[in-house]
Image (tube, coloured by chain):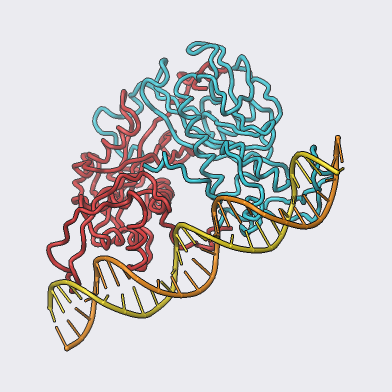
Chain colours: A cyan, B red, C yellow, D orange
Amino acid sequence: MDGSQFPAGYDPRAFPAVAVTVDVVALTIRQGALQVLLVERGEQPYAGRWALPGGFIRPGEDLPEAAARELAEETGLTPRAHIEQLASYGAPERDPRMRIVSVSYLAFAPDLPDPRPGTDAADAAWHRADRLPELAFDHGRILGHGLERARDKLEYTPLATTFVGETFTISELRGVYEAVWGLPLHAGNFHRKVLSVPGFVESTGETTESGGARGGPRARLYRAGDAKLLHPALLRPAREEEVR
Amino acid sequence: MDGSQFPAGYDPRAFPAVAVTVDVVALTIRQGALQVLLVERGEQPYAGRWALPGGFIRPGEDLPEAAARELAEETGLTPRAHIEQLASYGAPERDPRMRIVSVSYLAFAPDLPDPRPGTDAADAAWHRADRLPELAFDHGRILGHGLERARDKLEYTPLATTFVGETFTISELRGVYEAVWGLPLHAGNFHRKVLSVPGFVESTGETTESGGARGGPRARLYRAGDAKLLHPALLRPAREEEVR
DNA sequence: CCAATAGTGTCTTTCAGACATTATTGA
DNA sequence: TCAATAATGTCTGAAAGACACTATTGG
């Protein structure tokens, strides 16, 4: 009820301060692999360990705004980056210094430039999602949730198109699915499937300048369509282990 | 990065206090309809308006713990209530008194008793989800997200079984889907479909004591199976409006 | 020419949805 | 006897997945 009435002894203004941070799981595709933006901590605790980019919310700043700002501070730009809320974490001991509640965000963007470390970090770099170092705080868990969410959203939203350029080939789009899911997909079936989903992609009428690096015909170019949901969805093969 | 280093002027301990609350969207099914637990505010702002149950997190208390406590304080019990995090809301002006970030939770439970208002609320009651009053703060939006999430989760998880008793008939289960989705479903197809999903329900071998109120054979009784995900999912009819 | 890739066609299986049918109960 | 409901059967169409095939390019 948002502090309608403060039960005796629970006026928040009398509490030890709670701080709120946003932490961003920023994903991109580089060299055909899914990569995550991490910053190296310069101070204690966890000095020298990698962590998610993030920081405290500022007065007057909404949560998504704070997430976009933190991302911009680390990467230099927030071009057509899609950003959405992930989850919040507030275990009392998750930060040894004080009570901190973190609201995490998920960001996707096409092939981003190398990050320039913000003023507060020792270093910043992209890391392959399949070869991650151990992270500070509970950031490993947060990152895990972010990857899971991204994999799910590829199934029923056109999210994959935010990982590619303005125009793209069906093969490039397939490369996104393969990188995020970590699975090889059947080229022919994928192709037919994508074109059959209304509003997923629309043809530009153009083709690539030349064929593939190792031969093959020129591919047609597409741009993202106007669909907000994929119908029918592109389901990845059922993972029996996750069902029970 | 969780306050690794505090950029000049941004030490959170120097900030005007931020308070963190949890707000709970508690759902149950009563009289065949989906209902939401609301409390009537006793104080300003929004005195007399209905709001979601919730309150400030306490020192040493994790977020889900706080949500369970708030729910228990309003309903008297948290029996087999399923509880999961929904989203967080932190717009600077969402509470006129101070900066409050709210972490919302979604709770489902079978036919719960009438709530007894907590010490801090004027009243507490179940409200039909299809006839809601205007709510305090941004709680209308939070509640909307909660309902949306519940409708989605019925599709691919066995969540519906948390709305019924230990054992139940297929018709009762269908009643849950119809109440949450607000749609009539085809009895025969639903029946066959539910039994075809591995691990969704398992037979008890028993039947109801008597037939339906208006006649009909005795129905077989089932209990929840061990599936965590429904495969294949029970998709509700595609809503074209939501696709674009 | 050969290997690689783009794009299409075909077949099988699975599943959703419409509908019919049988059996069992209460009123 | 009649109406309502449980449970099952049948049919059609959509879609996924396996696989084959053609066409076009680079080397």
Q: Is residue D18 left or right of residue B203?
A: right
Q: Is residue B72 above or below residue A193?
A: above
**Residue at 47% in and 37% down:** B90
Q: Position of residue B54 (x, y in %)?
A: 31, 40
Q: Is residue A166 above or below residue B131?
A: above
Q: Position of residue B55 (x, y in %)?
A: 32, 36
Q: Is residue A105 left or right of residue B97?
A: right
Q: In this orientation, which residue lies closer to the viewer: A50 or B235?
A: B235
**Residue at 33% in and 68% down:** B188
**Residue at 48% in and 25% down:** A140
Q: In this orientation, which residue lies closer to the viewer: B224 or C2?
A: C2
Figure quadrant of residue B213: bottom left
Q: Position of residue B71 (x, y in %)?
A: 26, 41
Q: Position of residue B40 (x, y in %)?
A: 28, 49
Figure quadrant of residue A118: top right
Q: How many marks?
A: 0
Quadrant assignment for the C terminus of chain B: bottom right
Q: Is residue B187 left or right of residue A234?
A: left
Q: Is residue B129 visible?
A: no
Q: In this orientation, which residue lies closer to the viewer: B11 or B4?
A: B4
Q: Is residue A37 above or below residue B217?
A: above
Q: In this orientation, which residue lies closer to the viewer: B16 or B90?
A: B90
Q: Is residue A89 visible?
A: yes
